Image: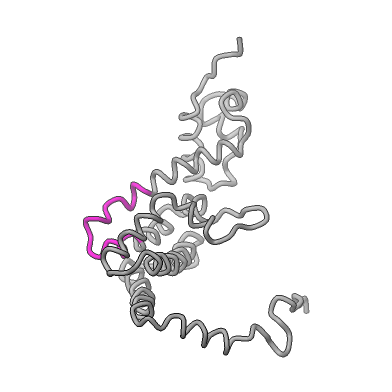
Amino acid sequence: MPPKPKCTREEVAAAALEIIKEDGLSGLTARELGSRLGTSSRPIFTVYHNMEEVKLAARELALEEFHEFISDYEQYTPAFKRIGMMMVSYGLHEPELFKLLFMQEHKGGRNFEETIKDLGETAQNCVRLVERDYDLTEEAARLLFEQMWTHAFGLGALCATGVCDLSEDEIGSRLGVVFAGMLMLIKSEKIAEVYSDVEVNTTGNYHGKKIREMPFRTD
């Protein structure tokens, strides 16, 4: 019979999450995890195949914490704005977990829809709230949510990486301006016309060269 594990999957994942909170993902090593659990690294690999599995388990716990962090949104009006503000605040107060949830590179890249799926149930809840509170179709609500999520992610990343230290008023103001502009554009029913103007006036060229074809300068 194989030896009985000295620690459970849940205990390993919880310890890994604490390490990431304190020292970032780079601090999560088998040796450090074993030390945190009061054992060697060997028992870890009786319940997980490798450290990548441990990281994914820790991420699942982090996502649960994030959902709990923003769970009071229904008590606020507008509820959708509350979610956006709490997402940015999460980057400010839990920077390492924000990076774990939203700033991990993926080999070969991913499309936007796959990235949105990382939000789990939060994405569906946001679309539902926007559709309900602003009398929009599901398609329009999804467009508004995706644009606002991109903006909120950017503000959260600035906070998580220490580039900015935003106050609650600043977060609300910056999210509010972009939200009002997007909502007015969608409600005007001229969004296709605006997109068309952008395509006509933005050729993607710079001094005769397409942006993607320009070499990096080293001088």
> For the N terminus, which image quadrant?
top right
Residue 170 location in percent, x, y? 35, 72
Q: Residue furthest top?
A: 1
Q: Residue at x 63, y 86 (%)?
A: 203
Q: How many numbered marks does the figure carry? A: 0
Where, by quadrant of the figure, is residue 146 drawn? bottom left
- Direction from residue 47 to residue 93 in the image, left or right: left
How far across and how far down the image is residue 49, in percent?
62, 30
**x, y percentage for residue 24?**
53, 48
Residue drawn where x is 55% and y is 33% of the image? 33
Q: Which residues are magenta?
A: 67-83
Front residue of this view, candidates 96 and 102: 102
Q: Residue at x 57, y 88 (%)?
A: 200
Residue 124 left/right relative to 27: left
Where in the figure is residue 171, as x and y percent of width and height?
36, 69
Position of the C terminus by quadrant: bottom right
Query: Taking 107 as reference, is 115 left or right?
Result: left
| Residue 81 inside the magenta-drawn segment | yes
